[in-house]
Image: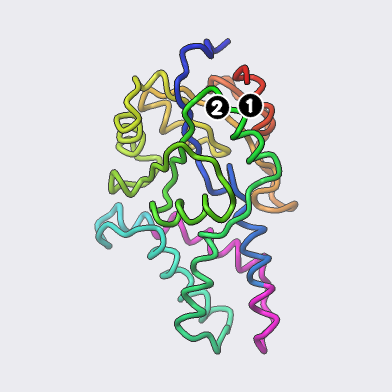
Amino acid sequence: MIDIMGIKALTFDVFGTVVDWRGSVIHEGKRLGSGLLVDVDWPAFADAWRQGYEPAMARVRTGELPWTKIDDLHRMILDRLLLEYGIEGLDEERKDYLNRVWHRLAPWPDAIDGLNRIRDRYVIAALSNGNVSLLTNMAKHAGLPWDCILSAELAKKYKPDREVYQTAVELLGFPSDQVMMVAAHKHDLDGAKMAGMRTAYVPRSLEFGTRHVVDVEPDDRYDMFAYDFNDLASKLGT
């Protein structure tokens, strides 16, 4: 059983853990598509956009690209998808607006209440590969009550690289074992654990839609398991 009294701060993965990126991209795509003379499979488009994320980061990790913030990686992927899906007629302003859908993602239904409960007792911070401006705009749009916004951009690395977690812990000013990483993705938690952080697994079964099977079982590799953020808040004593 985790000693919750030793935890001082929690950092949260954002895409998929706090916000519903897929549903948000589909919603905005359909709204945009209503004015275009093209039939777009927006769920497939959203999935393809997200699937381009890891390969794009890999190009930076291998040195093929210099350090690149997520907004710019998203735009590289988007430009390719617009061609693949035959989406024409978007001027630069509308392309930029579509790319910034990642700034306007909607939170999961339990996210705001759960985060506010946890914030009553602990410091809470975003810790995402999203760049600082993206995460700031998202928090403003969605009402996410962060005490602090931390980003992989600050370390010029991407999760699950160890430097991202180390930088976050150093900036928060607590020992690593007093900071808990919360995520719906096990590779993220594994990276945090390697950096000495505590870990909480909060799976999101609908992150990739109803056809994608997500492992939602508790895993004793991690310090805590919760079904959602309100369950996490209760287990943290708030």
Amino acid residing under circle 1: Leu
The structure residue drawn at horizontal position 53% and vertical position 14%, both measured from the top left corner, is 4
Labels 1 and 2: the sequence-earlier one: 2
Q: Nearer the viewer, mark 1 or mark 2?
A: 1
Q: For residue 54: magenta?
A: yes
Rendering quarter of residue 220: top right
The structure residue drawn at horizontal position 45% and vertical position 52%, both measured from the top left corner, is 136
Point out which mark residue 130 bears: none
Amino acid residing under circle 2: Ala
Q: Position of residue 184 (x, y in %)?
A: 58, 38
Question: Is residue 129 found left or right of 85 in the rendered image?
Answer: left
Q: Pointers 1 and 2 in contact (CB under 8 A)?
A: yes
Instruction: Calculate the distance from the C-alpha at mark 1 to the C-alpha at mark 2.
Output: 8 Å
Q: For residue 111: magenta?
A: no
Rendering quarter of residue 134: bottom left
- Magenta stretch, main secondary structure, is helix
Helix, strand or loop for disc 2 = strand
Q: Mark 1 sits on what residue?
A: 232
Q: How is the image coloured?
A: rainbow
Point out which mark residue 200 bears: 2
Q: Is residue 76 above or below residue 10?
A: below
Helix, strand or loop for disc 1 = helix
Judging depth in this view, the residue of 222 and 232 nearest the camera is 232
